[in-house]
Image (cartoon, helix red, strand yellow):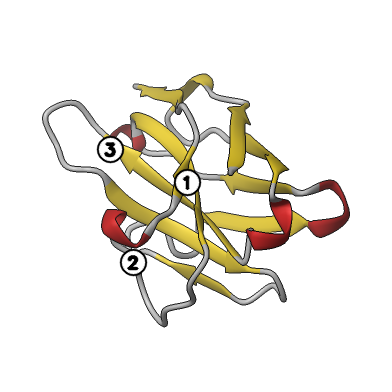
Amino acid sequence: QVQLVESGGGLVQAGGSLRLSCAASGRTFSTYVMGWFRQAPGKEREFVATITWSGRTYYADSVKGRFTVSRDNAKNTMYLQMNSLKLEDTAVYYCAVGTRWYSGAYRPGDIDYWGQGTQVTVSS
């Protein structure tokens, strides 16, 4: 089992920045791919970004150039730096771990472990 705890969410004005963190514990040797998904009210959970153990990243088109995913393997922690935030970035952000590697965007069904989520609200 892998336990994931997110932090860093909050309220920010449009154009601002936030940094999310996700700390993994438990069977962390299996945290091959870590990633972020988000879910806005009334919408399906959607892919944001992933990063492999070796640092290979992939982003959704909607966040490319604004968000940066990174990880510190020694600390079993992943980060999501979110810049130039837009109103449409408002959502609950979920940390995710997949034990299998896929090229491209992950689907929720590809994920093995989820965090509890952290709210990000972007105001005008």
Q: Camera-side residue: 42 or 23?
A: 23
Q: CA distance from mark 1 to mark 2?
A: 24 Å
Quickly name the residue at label 1.
113
Dot 3 amino acid type: Glu
Dot 2 amino acid type: Asp
Question: Disc count in the image?
Answer: 3
Dot 1 amino acid type: Tyr
Q: Residues within 10 Å of mark 2 (few under 14, many from 20)?
A: few
In percent of width and height, residue 102 lies at 42, 79
Task: Give the vertical position of 10 relative to 113 (above or below).
Answer: above
Task: Give the vertical position of 9 relative to 93 (above or below).
Answer: above
Quickly name the residue at label 2.
61
Residue 70 as seen in the image, left or right of residue 119: right
Q: Camera-side residue: 65 or 112?
A: 112
Q: CA distance from mark 2 to mark 3?
A: 13 Å
In percent of width and height, residue 2 lies at 60, 43
Q: Residue furthest left?
A: 42
Task: Give the vertical position of 104 relative to 28 (above or below).
Answer: below
Label 3 element class? helix
Q: Earlier in the sequence, mark 1 or mark 2?
A: 2
Residue 23 as seen in the image, left or right of residue 120: right
Q: Residue furthest right?
A: 74
At x 68%, y 58%, the residue is: 70
In percent of width and height, residue 64 lies at 44, 64
Q: Earlier in the sequence, mark 3 or mark 1?
A: 3
Q: Are marks 2 and 3 in contact (CB under 8 Å)?
A: no
As drawn, the label of residue 95 is none
Residue 80 as seen in the image, left or right of residue 54: left
